[in-house]
Every structure is written in C-alpha cells, then in structure tokens.
Image (spheres, rainbow, N blue to C red):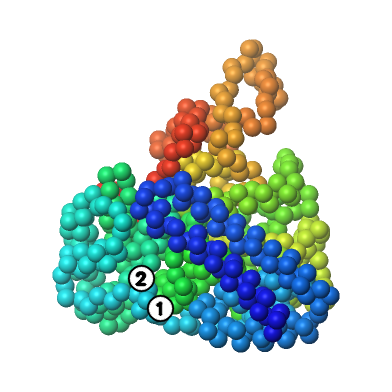
C-alpha cells in the first residue's frame, strides 16, 4: 500500500500543477494578457513531463531494487486501483500510473497484468455533473437566452456592445434553426468552464433535441474596445475545425474530465476520444486512448501495415494501416541526399511544433516509444524497408515488431496527390489555401523550409496543413535576401551560385521554381499570394514578430467574412 500511496501522491501533485496553470487562462483572457497566455501554454506543456520524470526518479529511489519487480508492481496495481474509487479523474490517474510503472520496469509493448489498459474510456463515464453544466429550457426567445448565458458566464471584463452582439448572434441562430427544420429544441445545455486558447475563448454547449444533440459554440474575442460575442458555430464540421488536430490545446478548468469528454463526444461524434483529450491538453492520456484504439482495431481487422501513399521521404519512413486513419513516421538511420542533419535535429523540430502555436496549419504529432506491433500484420516489403533503413529504431522480437521511437499523425491526402485526383473547383480552392497556410505559418513565426506540395496535406474539411518538419525553422532565424544579379552570362549559366550563401539564407523569388504547380495553377497562386515571392513580405513578418505582435487566427468564418 505504501508504494501505491507514493505513486498516487505524485499523481495528485502533477495534476495540481497542471490545473493551477489551466485556471489562469480565464483571467488572461479577461485582462487581454496574451503574452501571459502564451507563456502559460508553454509552461503547461513542460510541467507534466518534468514532474513525471521527477516522480519516476524519486519513486525509483524509494523502491530500491523492487522498482523492477513485476510481482511488486502487480500488488501496487491492485492497491492503486482501490485508491481511485473516489478519484474525480480516474482515467488520468491510471495513465499516470502507466507512465511511472512502464519507465521503472522498462516495459516494451503492453504489460497486461500491470498496465491499466482495459479500463473504460471517457465516453463511458456519463455526462458531466451539474457543477459544470448549465441547462436552459427552450422557450424560443433566443435574445433572452443569450443574455442569460452571458450573465451566468460573469466575465470580469466589459463588453464592447453586449446588446448588439446578442441581437446579431441571436438572428444567426434563429436562421439556422429555421433552415434545419424539425421540432424546436427541448433545451440548451452549456458547459460552465470556458475553453481558452491563444486570444480567444469559447462557450461550448449543445441543443437538446428529441432525436439527439447539435452543437452550439459561442466564440468570444477581446480586442481593446472590449469583449465581443463574435458569432455562433452551429455546424458540426465548423466545430470540428475548432477542435482540430492542427490547433493548439485548450485550457479548460475542470475537475472531472471524463464527463466533459462525454459531452464533447455528443456534439463531435466523429472525433476520436483520443483527440478530444488531446484537444484539452491531456495529450498523455490522449496517447493512452490512441493506443487502446489501435489495439482494439488490430483485434477486429486483418489488413496489413503498408507504406503510406505519397512521395517517398528522404528523412522519414512513413507507413499506415489502410483501415485505420493514422500514419506512423520513423526517422531513417541515414538521410537521402541532398538532405542533411541528424536524428536529434529532426526530433528538436518536432518538439518545437509541439510547443508552438499551430494555428490550424501544423499537424499535431504524438510521440511513442517502445511500441510493439504484431509481425504478421506487416507487408513484407515494408518490413524489409524498415529493417534495412531504420535498423537503429526497428527490430524483431519474437512474433512482434518493436519500434523504439515513432511519431503518429492523422492521415490525410498529400497535396500533390490531391491536385492530381480532385476535380477542378476543389483543386483551385486547395491551391489558394496552400498559400493561406504558408501565410498563416509565417504569421505564427514558422518557416516551412521546404515548400514542395508533397509536404502539405489536405484534411477531410478541405484545409491545407503542413506535416513535414525536418527543415522547419522560425521566420526570425532566417535571412531573407534578393538574388544578386550575375555579373556576366557565364555566371548565370553556372550550376553553382555566383555569390556567397550562408546556411540560413533564403531567396523568396526562388519559391516559384520549387513549388512545382502546373502553369495555370501557378498563375492562380501568384494572383492570390504573389507577395510570398518577395523579400519585403518575409522581412515585414520578421519585424512584426520582433515587436512582439500577436496575430489573430480565427478557426471559423467570422460574421463579417464570407464563408470560405
């Protein structure tokens, strides 16, 4: 029991530190403290792994030689499970236990008699209790409903035009409900905690209908003039984009996350439980749910892991299970020319993306170690490729393939394949959004490094996102230059540059050559995004970042904007 109490005490400490940072988010929004919000976002990402590592070190010292005793851990498992009977967040506590026990035991794959693996997922824990849920009976007066919601929210900040915002958003809601037809809602239910991220906050709720639920999400903004109720998001696809895997994590102050996840699942039924946990900052438990989902899928399917569609990577080997919406990315032992760099540099770039504001344009990658998968589920050519080109990471152990280090990402269609397969309107929209992606990444101080179409993907919502990070860097770390003119015709024909080039030199006018679009699409891109080929655009971005500006990124069409 002492061992179980020690693990549980460490778990409570980690949870408290996470919650303390999370609770600051509402005040940051109310006070327009965007620098503080950004600092909190990074601190919260760092606090859990730091405290988990400290807990592992201390518990290892406390347990001495018994730290690697499986019988000892089986006893701790039983005692720990008993401690969780009154715990408000047992699923998160079980994941913490797994993190600690697996590190001390050096577990590879699943330790079925020690890991908490088959426990219920968040969607089976029921709706949130009334402490975090407000229910409003429906009487058809949407203006009065919104007025009451904002009153119950009780923000410590002044609204710029509270009455005007309510009338405008109420009209939008009435139009939507009228267009949907069917019986009116029975009630509206709203989660009490605000979902805060970057410079925005979201009131998250649902319409309770006789046949189920529909989402109701109310974004709030806070410009210098005061808080504004920006719009109402009433469509599942729009709300799904707000909770996208390419967005940074929300800060949501909540004591019982299982019920909250169940609520989110009721309005986003296509979102995996793993992504919902990750979206609210619990990426460790999200990885647990992802692994559970993968194991369940392997038990109920029979297709083989194969090389993922798209151009072969020079730095990463990428494979997937056709029936499962995830790709697995492994760093090669040696990079194909002309790529340079090291494994450590690639991993550092993935860590940069993990901590950075992804603005809906960088795919969130989950990092797994010591992953064990059944050997018979691998295509022979893929397995030979992995064993030959990633032997430092992949090896066979009995009937299993053991992968010491791998990143997982949501599968999407590479942009170069999308352009070949899609019909004309979709292609043109994707090309324009490809430029939007580069522009928004620059506004977030991210330079992709490699603009090739194969490094961008198209999501099921038609958004273009970037997923190849081996050459990614900060815009402020680049030196953007104009190409010096050749001094003679011979210099222009010389394959080598006729001027000195440093490692961080970037020549935007060269992007036209690298993008590789057909002429008609290249002209379309240039009409919308020609300034991306100029030094002036990139130096302006650098200057704005150096001044400490925080750009606005809205993951939804604003009322004043035409729908995209």
Rendering quarter of residue 103: bottom right
Q: Residue at x 78, y 63 (%)?
A: 394
Q: Which residue is mark 1?
A: 128
Mark 1: give few (<14), some (14-19) or many (20+) Cα within 10 Å: some
- Residue shown at the point (35%, 66%) measured from the top left: 204
Instruction: Give percent across and percent down for residue 143.
Output: 17, 64
Disc 1 is placed on an element classified as: loop
**Among the two numbered marks 1 and 2 on one chain, the one whose residue lies closer to the N terminus:** 1
* Crowd class of label 2 (few under 14; some 14 to 19; many from 20; radius 10 Å): many
Residue at numbered disc 2: 191
Residue 460: image x %, image y %? 46, 61
Q: Is residue 16 left or right of residue 431?
A: right
Q: Quadrant of the N terminus?
A: bottom right
Q: Which of the two residues, 217 or 564, is positioned nearer the viewer here?
A: 217
Height in image: 214 above or below 344? below
Left or right: 363 with respect to 259?
right
**Tag 2, which secondary structure?**
strand
Q: Position of residue 36 (x, y in %)?
A: 46, 49
Inter-mark Cα distance, 1 to 2: 9 Å
Residue at the outermost top position: 488
Give 267 or 144, whichever is nearer the viewer. 144
**Is the C-beta separation of discs 1 and 2 under 8 Å?**
yes
> Splitting the image into 4 quarters, where does residue 505 fall?
top right
Q: Residue at x 57, y 43 (%)?
A: 448
Image position, residue 257 (x, y; %): 48, 73
């Amino acid at each position: 029991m002492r061992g179980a109490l020690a693990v549980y005490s460490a778990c409570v400490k980690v949870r408290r530190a996470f919650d303390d940072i999370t609770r600051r988010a509402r005040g940051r929004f109310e006070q327009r403290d965007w620098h503080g919000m950004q600092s909190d976002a990074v601190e919260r990402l760092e606090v859990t792994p730091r405290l988990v590592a400290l807990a592992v070190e201390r518990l290892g010292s406390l347990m001495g030689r018994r730290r690697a005793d499986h019988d000892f851990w089986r006893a701790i498992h039983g005692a720990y499970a008993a401690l969780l009977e009154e715990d408000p967040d047992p699923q998160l506590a079980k994941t913490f236990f797994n993190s600690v026990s697996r590190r001390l035991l050096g577990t590879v794959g699943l330790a079925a008699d020690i890991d908490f693996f088959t426990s219920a997922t968040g969607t089976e824990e029921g709706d949130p209790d009334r402490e975090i849920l407000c229910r409003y009976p429906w009487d058809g007066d949407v203006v009065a409903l919104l007025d009451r919601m904002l009153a119950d929210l009780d923000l410590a900040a002044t609204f710029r035009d509270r009455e005007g915002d309510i009338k405008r958003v109420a009209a939008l809601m009435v139009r939507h409900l009228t267009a949907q037809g069917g019986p009116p809602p029975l009630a509206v239910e709203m989660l009490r905690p605000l979902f805060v991220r970057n410079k925005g906050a979201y009131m998250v709720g649902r319409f309770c209908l006789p046949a189920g639920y529909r989402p109701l999400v109310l974004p709030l903004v806070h410009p210098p003039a005061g808080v504004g109720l920006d719009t109402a998001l009433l469509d599942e696809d729009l709300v799904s984009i707000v909770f996208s895997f390419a967005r940074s994590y929300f800060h949501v102050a909540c004591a019982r996350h299982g019920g909250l996840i169940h609520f989110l699942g009721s309005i986003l039924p296509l979102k995996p439980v793993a992504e919902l946990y990750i979206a609210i900052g619990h990426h460790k438990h999200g990885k647990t749910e992802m692994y559970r989902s993968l194991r369940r899928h392997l038990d109920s399917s029979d297709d083989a892991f194969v090389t993922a569609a798209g151009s072969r990577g020079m730095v990463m080997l990428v494979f997937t299970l056709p029936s499962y919406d995830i790709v697995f990315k492994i760093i090669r032992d040696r990079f194909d020319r002309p790529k340079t760099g090291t494994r450590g540099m690639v991993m550092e770039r993935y860590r940069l993306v993990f901590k950075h504001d992804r603005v809906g344009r960088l795919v969130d990658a989950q990092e797994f170690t010591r992953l064990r998968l059944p050997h018979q589920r691998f295509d022979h050519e893929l397995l030979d490729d992995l064993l030959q080109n990633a032997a430092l990471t992949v090896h066979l152990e009995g009937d299993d393939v053991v992968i010491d280090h791998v990143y997982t990402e949501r599968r999407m269609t590479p942009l170069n394949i999308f352009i070949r397969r899609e019909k004309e309107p979709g292609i043109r929209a994707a090309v324009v959004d490809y430029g939007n992606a580069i522009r928004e990444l620059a506004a977030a101080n991210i330079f992709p490094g490699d603009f090739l179409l194969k490094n961008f993907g198209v999501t099921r919502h038609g958004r273009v996102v970037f997923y190849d990070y081996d050459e990614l860097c900060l815009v402020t770390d680049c030196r953007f230059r104009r190409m010096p003119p050749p001094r003679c015709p011979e210099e222009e024909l010389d394959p080598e540059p006729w001027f000195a080039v440093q490692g961080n030199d970037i020549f935007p006018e060269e992007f036209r050559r690298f993008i590789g679009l057909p002429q008609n699409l290249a002209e379309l891109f240039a009409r919308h995004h020609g300034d991306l080929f100029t030094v002036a655009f990139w130096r302006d971005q650098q200057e704005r970042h150096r001044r400490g500006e925080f750009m606005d990124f809205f993951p939804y069409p604003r009322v004043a904007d035409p729908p995209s």
